Amino acid sequence: MVDAAPPSPNVARLDAVVAAHGARATELVQILRDAQALDGWLPPATITYLAHRLRLPRARVEGVAGFYAFLHLTPAGRYRVLFSDNVTDRMAGSLDLLDRLCTSLWIERGKVSEDGLVSVDTTSCTGMGDQAPAILVNGRAIPRMTPERVDAVAELIRAQVDLCEWPADLFAVADNVHRRDVLLDAIVAPGDALRAAIARGAREPERAGSARSWREGVPALPQGPAATLEEIKRSNLRGRGGAGFTTGLKWEACRTAPGTTRYVVCNADEGEPGTFKDRVLLARHADLVLEGMTVCAYAIGATQGFVYLRGEYEYLAAPLRATIARRRAANLLGTSILGQRGFDFDVVLHLGAGAYVCGEESALIESLEGKRGVPRNRPPYPVTHGYLQQPTVVNNVETFCAAALIALNGGDWYRGLGTPRSTGTKLLCVSGDCARPGIYEYPFGTTVRQVLADCGAERTQAVQVSGPSGTCIGAAEFGRKLAFEDLPTAGAFMVFDDTRDMFEVARNFAHFFAHESCGFCTPCRVGTTLLRNVMDKIHGMRGSQHDVDRIRRLNRLLQASSHCGLGHTACNPLLDTLKRFRPAYERRLQSLDFEPAFDLDGALARARAMTGRDDASAHLAEVDEDASAVAGRGQP
């Protein structure tokens, strides 16, 4: 790329960005996103000026900008093209398409073109597993890439057509909903769940009045909050983000925590590869999501809410903000909601900037506060020390939808769905080797075999349940049930037929964890890198039983000493495939003894070619053998 002096900051434009966010340091990630839009990257002078305006150390601002994949401290090109590198995208031919685009644009992967026009690289997952392969261009998603669509993108870039003028059909994202149940079939008018909650409280004054201390030192809202919380507890709703903590207990712990300010956070940062249900819920059921957040605020006494939307879903931001504004105009957000004095609650949308670890609730809160998304030490937990160290409920998009339905129909109704320990329904994101990838809603307790039949999967050898951090099962286990008591899931359901190499699937996941480690703790930062290197070594046909044993040793280390769940689960796909598909590993092992990862003799091949030597003594292996023979004769 042609060297050029970094542009001086446009002070007036930067001042407008800072002012739009109230000059608050907690808005740093949003300010950096908006500032980057001015020049396409964050020049040093821009970082310096923003640090001055926000009264922050410059190192703090630069450190935050350097943490997130979608923020750039060096020029990244006017057009930034990122191919999704999820395993299902690879199965659909993404790497060949990436090479085709690079060849067409005369550019090297991972580099910026010499004229500064374009860069092409990969990103972990775009949330488009049902319409892979997909790409992002300047943050906008383009699904269902084909050679023809790649050529069209290349031509638009060469012609320097502004992104807003690209054909709309390129950006069309399908919902691909193939099975509906109570959630996806629900027809709920905005405000209905809130009205039901308020009315229920009026019918049950004694129960509602028994829990007046919903906010310490502040009189309870009339009747409704305690009754609403009781319905959520009776439903036995569990969090849909994967951990499965009981929602009613979480809400109650937040409501009874000391303090007068409470927050509600919707975790819409679904970065787990193979997951895309939140994309559909936010696109088609945004009112239900916001209704569930408002029900939560009513129950716990919160006045402020946040939707934390992953950066890959930036195209959903404008319609979400429009829905928030519409609900505010209808008195479903704001002050005295539905005429209930003291029921004040509003919602703000925050955009992520490309960090898988921010799906962890405490890392998400750190990002909301304008910091690097590094998970916090726990305890204390967010329900007592969350956003700005105040009591905070963080729930998944799907969880809030379910909460709205419970407020409308009652806890007993919801408890009648699914299983006793896993009540309600679950949205599955089916992708991979099947005829009908997309969204399927089932009552908990449905078998894996049923899902495979419904999605048109044939000759299936494996299913990865709940993404890389979940469980990989083989054909003998397809009778198992999707439920917290058997196969818990955050929603991902990746199908692999008998043509797929399960070692390569696990290797892709190892690369994912190494790339997405936040780097905060040494066990995870180094351990995930070592796992990736071991898998690459085995892939290169230089592995041994020693390397297989090393995976197990690294798992013990990561389980015992990693700071957060990323490190704890990084070995899951490797151990599961070793257990169920061991031949995929063994056919790559060249020795049962130790083999070094670095081939020093091979590295000297270029030197031998330059000197014209290729005799036995120019090879390390022969020298070692000769030395061993000499040692065997007792000679020095």
Image (cartoon, rainbow, N blue to C red):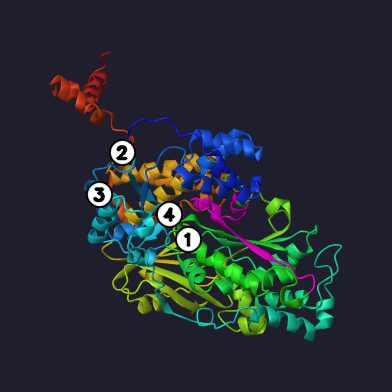
Q: CA distance from mark 2 to mark 4?
A: 21 Å
Numbered disc 3: secondary structure:
helix
Left or right placement of residue 83 versus residue 9 in this view: left
- Horizontal arrangement in the rendering, residue 34 relative to residue 392 (left or right): left
Q: Amino acid at mark 3?
A: Asp
What is the secondary structure assignment of the residue under circle 1?
A: loop
Instruction: Residue under label 4, please give it.
Output: 139
The residue shown at (45%, 64%) is 275
The Cα atoms of the two marked residues, 2 and 3, are separated by 20 Å
Give the class, few, some or many, for how many residues have Cα within 10 Å of label 4's Cα (few <14, many ≥20): many
The relative height of residue 214 versus residue 418 in the rendered view (above or below) is above
Location of residue 134 in the rendering, given as x and y in whole percent from the top left corner: 35, 59
Q: Residue 86's image quarter?
A: bottom left
Choose the circle earlier in sequence order: 1 or 2: 2
Amino acid type of the residue that numbered disc 4 sits on in the rendered structure: Gly
Q: Amino acid at mark 1?
A: Gly
CA gap, disc 1 and disc 4: 28 Å
Mark 2, other Cα within 10 Å: few <14 / some 14–19 / many ≥20: few
Q: Earlier in the sequence, mark 3 or mark 4?
A: 3
Q: Earlier in the sequence, mark 2 or mark 3?
A: 3
Q: Position of residue 561 (x, y in %)?
A: 57, 44
Instruction: Say which residue label 3 marks.
Output: 99
Q: Which residues are magenta?
A: 341-367
> Helix or strand or loop: what does disc 2 sit on?
loop
Report which residue position mark 1 lands on: 470
Mark 1 surroundings: few (<14), some (14-19) or many (≥20) residues within 10 A: many
> Viewer-nearest of labels 2 and 4?
2
**Count of numbered tags:** 4
Res. 174 in view: yes
